[in-house]
Image (cartoon, rainbow, N blue to C red):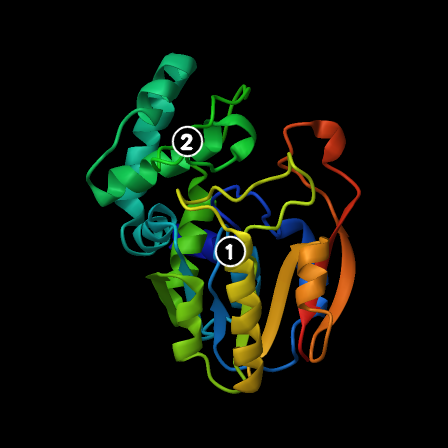
Amino acid sequence: MKQQYDQILVIPKPFVKWAGGKRQLISLLNENLPETFGTYYEPFLGGGALLFHILTKKNGQKCSISDLNSDLVLAYTTIRDRIDELISSLKIHEKNYQKDSKFYYYYVRGTNPRSEIEKTSRLLFLNRTCFNGLYRVNSKGKFNVPLGKYTNPNIVNEENLHSVSNILQSSRVSIKCRDFEAVLRDAKKGDLVYFDPPYQPVSETANFTSYTNKNFTFDDLSRLSELCMKLDLKGCRVLLSNSDSKEVLDMFEKKPWKVSKIQANRSINSNSKKRTGHFELLIKNY
């Protein structure tokens, strides 16, 4: 009974650090949500900060969430359905990491487990212990981030994992692995679609588009802008986050789009001096 009570008290938050995560912008995003909407769609799920915020405010809200990263989608379903087994596996990682962090990190990074529990456990372990919590894979789909400098990383984070599992079980949330364009088949008039894609780089070195082994290209951005127009014609409410870049501004300069600049920190830049004071765009059609 106490554990169930604790789960209610702990507000669920993202269980992975993700480049471009929205935890720091939640209050601003909340101000820009429509007062009412039908189903909530999020086709670039990532860490799911806005999803957890919406579910906390309105437990039972119908949501359809998806991502092209199959390991990430598996993590959400495993946390929802097999939380106790996952936590047991993470505790083994934690114990081994404490014995010899460098050896164990690179050993786990080099493995390719078959079971769903071990796949998810590996992803969460690497995310908690890798450099800057950056999820990045190479062209072969292999996770390639070096070990981070942490004295005591929170590898298990049991309270939050239980809280996430609890809210995903108790809400009407469907979780799929698919391309973002698939949302057009499902979304109806009055639904809210939030797009938070890998951002267009604002400089040659600021490229964080390797979440899967297929980069998010300029052609993908063009597909996304066309999809936003189709959703608008269906009567859907569309909210989009992206970088303050000329390419994005050019695509969304005309009606029905309202573009606002918001200030945000880039907490995942490898150069700590470049983690503050940049702007990004918030685009909506309502």
Q: Are marks 1 and 2 in contact (CB under 8 Å)?
A: no
Residue reaching furthest to the left: 114
Mark 1 element type: loop
Instruction: Specify the amino acid type for callout 1.
Output: Gly
Seen from the viewer's position, the closer of residues 35 and 165 is: 35
Residue 270 placement: quadrant = top right
Instruction: Specify the amino acid type for callout 2.
Output: Leu
Cα separation between marks 1 and 2: 18 Å
Q: Residue 129's x, y, as percent? A: 47, 27
Q: Residue at x 52, y 79 (%)?
A: 230
Seen from the viewer's position, the closer of residues 146 and 27 is: 146
What mark, if any, has residue 186 been given in the picture? none
Tell me if I can see residue 30 in this picture: no
Tell me if I can see residue 236 in this picture: yes
Q: Residue at x 32, y 51 (%)?
A: 74
What mark, if any, has residue 48 been given in the picture? 1
Q: Earlier in the sequence, mark 1 or mark 2?
A: 1
Mark 2 element type: helix
Question: In this rendering, is residue 106 above or below 143?
Answer: above
Q: Is residue 171 left or right of residue 197?
A: left
Q: Quadrant of the N terminus?
A: bottom left
Q: Residue 84's x, y, as percent? A: 29, 45
Question: In this rendering, is residue 262 above or below 209?
Answer: below
Bin the neighbour count of mark 2 within 10 Å (Cα to Cα): few under 14, some 14-19, many 20 and up.
many
Q: Is residue 262 left or right of residue 240?
A: right
What mark, if any, has residue 126 been given in the picture? 2
